[in-house]
Amino acid sequence: MSSNALAPYQLVKEQLDVRLQELKLFGMLPRLLQELATARADGRYPRLLNTYARTNLLVLDDWGLSPLTDEQRKDLFEILEDRYDILSTLVTSQLPIPKWHQIIGDPSIADALLDRLVHNAHKLTLKGESMRKKHKHVED
């Protein structure tokens, strides 16, 4: 197939990619939390919180890689409180849900945060080897 024949498909894909970016905000949770800390220091914090609150689908990747600080717990709680029962939040984690309490830290905030996150949630537990490991074997 010539590159000219692919042009309409490429255009549709690019338009779809742009539309998807309008609908979702994707981020590794550690980077998102770091961005919030930076935004707090440079004055963008309220605007950034508003962005997270209004995004149709907020994807929090790599939940639970490290324990949360007090500031991070409060930031995450504020984001999830603003989104609760209004917009969708997708969380990916290799840590089982029963261990999330421990990673969040403060029991009161952990209860409130997880109540907002897990209530009405659809949970998918994937089994099997990591896709990264599978693809690595194919490439080797």
Image (cartoon, rainbow, N blue to C red):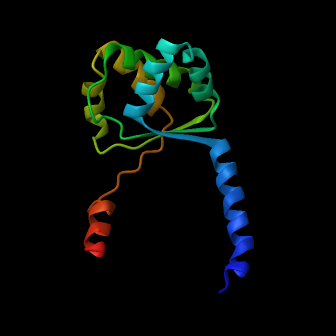
Q: Residue placed at 31% from the left, 18% from the top?
A: 69
Q: Residue placed at 67% from the left, 63% from the top?
A: 13
Q: Residue placed at 50% from the left, 19% from the top?
A: 39
- Viewport quadrant of the N terminus: bottom right
Q: Residue placed at 51% from the left, 14% from the top?
A: 42
Q: Could you tell me how many numbered marks the image carries?
A: 0
> Can residue 128 be seen here?
no
Q: Is residue 88 above or below residue 36?
A: below
**Residue 91 in the image, given as x and y percentages of width and height:** 43, 40
Q: Is residue 49 above or below residue 13?
A: above
Image-based side of 6 in relation to 48, left or right: right
Figure quadrant of residue 10: bottom right
Figure quadrant of residue 109: top left
Q: Is residue 73 above or below residue 17?
A: above
State the residue lying farthest toward the bottom: 1
**Residue 60 in the image, given as x and y percentages of width and height:** 45, 38
Image-based side of 68 in relation to 11, left or right: left
103, 6: nearer the viewer: 6
**Residue 14 in the image, given as x and y percentages of width and height:** 68, 59
7, 124: nearer the viewer: 7
**Residue 62 in the image, given as x and y percentages of width and height:** 36, 41
- Viewport quadrant of the C terminus: bottom left
> Can residue 110 be seen here?
yes
Image-based side of 74 in relation to 25, left or right: left
Image-based side of 139 in relation to 79, left or right: left
